[in-house]
Image (cartoon, rainbow, N blue to C red):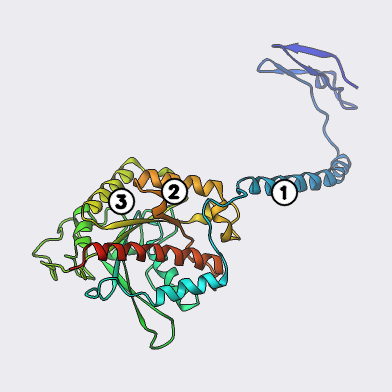
């Protein structure tokens, strides 16, 4: 079956016989780049059909092997023991919901907890507000103006560049009670939309009125319309929540990392507690159909550790969340992650209020 062997640059390739009726030159091995390749006879239509028919079982077998291998690799990324213990029952979600709905600030002079969400564009700040309200309403909605998908260089929040605050409500029913929780959103960091460290700190200190439009040409100052010269505890931000994208944090630029770290240091100097919400976990978490397995995911734990290094914050101050995006109805495990994030925020709010009670 094998023809004469040709030796080229140390590699040996067996010659193949010429096809019937071909010239002598067609059967000769051709040298290309120092390698000898034998001429291959042209396949007839009947040969191709027979080969295709014979290959079908083998192709199906290979696909089955690849599918099984992918399944095994998926579970290789899931630890047998979760690195955080969570009760994923419906009773837990119900208890968390009741805790949020009945929440009252630890200081009587403060009518509502004020939480500021900050982070890069596309991280999911507005989506988090909408998702939390969706959990409370029992149906998915977009109350806040949600920005574009991750990776985009713009956001809807940037287009207005305003300080936008949202008071949560206990339900979507008419007359639903307003909760003692206000979530505020601003333009994403690094957008070049007028948001500066100076303006961000002015918001946290309570000088900036809701609805204020930011501009790099007009930093917040005593001449700003609605400027609060002597903000009381109720005017100030009681907790800062950094929102970072799990799928992109490993690619954050040095400039973005430096901005986040400088902001954290300044906020710490103000005595305001900080947490981090790691969003888009379904983009790095292997089993995206079951959020109850997130704390068994090795890739997600690695991302959380990376976020801890970028922000300079302990893992205990960080939680993974999945915002609602294309779903029509809330889901138990996604709800639990969102409510646990809000519960962590409110715990730090109360800690701040007790430390700074007037």
Residue at horizontal 60 percent and vertical 55 percent from the top: 287
Say which residue label 3 marks.
190
Q: Which comes before the other along the chain, label 1 or label 2? A: 1
Q: CA distance from mark 1 to mark 2?
A: 28 Å
25, above or below 155, in the image? above
- Disc 2 is placed on an element classified as loop
Q: Nearer the viewer, residue 267 or 56?
A: 267
Q: Give yes or no for contact between labels 3 and 2 (Cβ–Cβ under 8 Å).
A: no
Residue located at (75% from left, 47% from top) = 63
Tag of residue 224: none
Q: Is residue 159 left or right of residue 216?
A: right
Sequence-first tag of 3 and 2? 3
Cα separation, mark 3 vs mark 2, equals 14 Å
Q: Nearer the viewer, residue 35 or 346?
A: 346
Residue 223 percent location from the top left of the image: 8, 65
Front residue of this view, candidates 263 and 110: 110
The vertical placement of 331 against 315, above or below, is below
Q: Which residue is mark 2?
A: 248
**Can you identify the residue that label 1 sits on?**
67
Query: In the rendered view, does 349 fall on the left or right side of 140?
Result: left
Disc 1 is placed on an element classified as helix
In the structure shown, which secondary structural element does the residue marked by tag 3 occupy? loop
Residue 58 image offset from top left, x and y in percent: 83, 43
Give how far across and how far down residue 72 sits, in percent: 69, 46
Q: Residues within 10 Å of mark 2 (few under 14, many from 20)?
A: some
Q: Quadrant of the C terminus?
A: bottom left
Residue 241 falls left or right of residue 202: right
Image x and y of residue 227, in percent: 13, 68
Looking at the rendering, in which quadrant would you find the N terminus?
top right
Inter-mark Cα distance, 1 to 3: 41 Å
């Amino acid at each position: 079956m094998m023809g004469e062997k040709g030796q080229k640059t140390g590699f040996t390739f067996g010659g193949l016989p010429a096809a019937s009726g071909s010239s002598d030159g067609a059967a000769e091995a051709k040298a290309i780049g120092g390698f000898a390749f034998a001429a291959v006879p042209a396949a007839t239509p009947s040969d191709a059909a027979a080969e295709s028919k014979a290959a079908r079982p083998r192709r199906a077998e290979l696909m089955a092997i690849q599918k099984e291998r992918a399944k095994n690799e998926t579970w290789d990324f899931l630890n047998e023991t979760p690195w955080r213990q969570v009760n994923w029952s419906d009773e837990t979600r119900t208890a968390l919901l009741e805790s949020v709905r009945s929440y009252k600030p630890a200081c009587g002079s403060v009518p509502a907890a004020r939480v500021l969400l900050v982070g890069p564009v596309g991280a999911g700040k507005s989506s988090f507000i909408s998702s939390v309200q969706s959990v409370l309403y029992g149906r998915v909605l977009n109350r806040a103006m949600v920005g574009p998908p991750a990776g985009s260089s713009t956001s809807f929040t940037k287009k207005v560049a305003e300080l936008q605050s949202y008071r949560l409500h206990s339900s979507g029913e008419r007359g639903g009670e307003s909760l003692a929780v206000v979530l505020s959103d601003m333009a994403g960091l690094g957008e070049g939309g007028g948001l500066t460290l100076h303006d961000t700190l002015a918001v946290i200190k309570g000088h900036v009125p809701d609805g204020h439009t930011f501009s790099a040409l007009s930093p917040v100052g005593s001449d700003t319309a609605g400027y609060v010269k002597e903000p009381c505890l109720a005017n100030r931000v009681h907790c800062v929540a950094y929102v970072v994208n799990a799928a992109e944090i490993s690619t954050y630029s040095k400039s973005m990392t430096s901005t986040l770290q400088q902001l954290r240091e300044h906020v710490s100097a103000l005595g305001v507690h900080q947490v981090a919400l790691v969003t888009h976990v379904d983009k790095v978490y292997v089993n995206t159909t079951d959020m109850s397995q997130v704390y068994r995911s090795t890739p997600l734990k690695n991302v959380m550790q990376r976020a801890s290094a970028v922000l300079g914050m302990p893992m205990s101050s960080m939680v993974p969340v999945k915002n609602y995006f294309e779903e029509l109805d809330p889901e138990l495990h996604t709800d639990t992650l969102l409510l646990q994030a809000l519960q962590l925020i409110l715990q730090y709010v109360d800690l701040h209020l007790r430390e700074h009670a007037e």
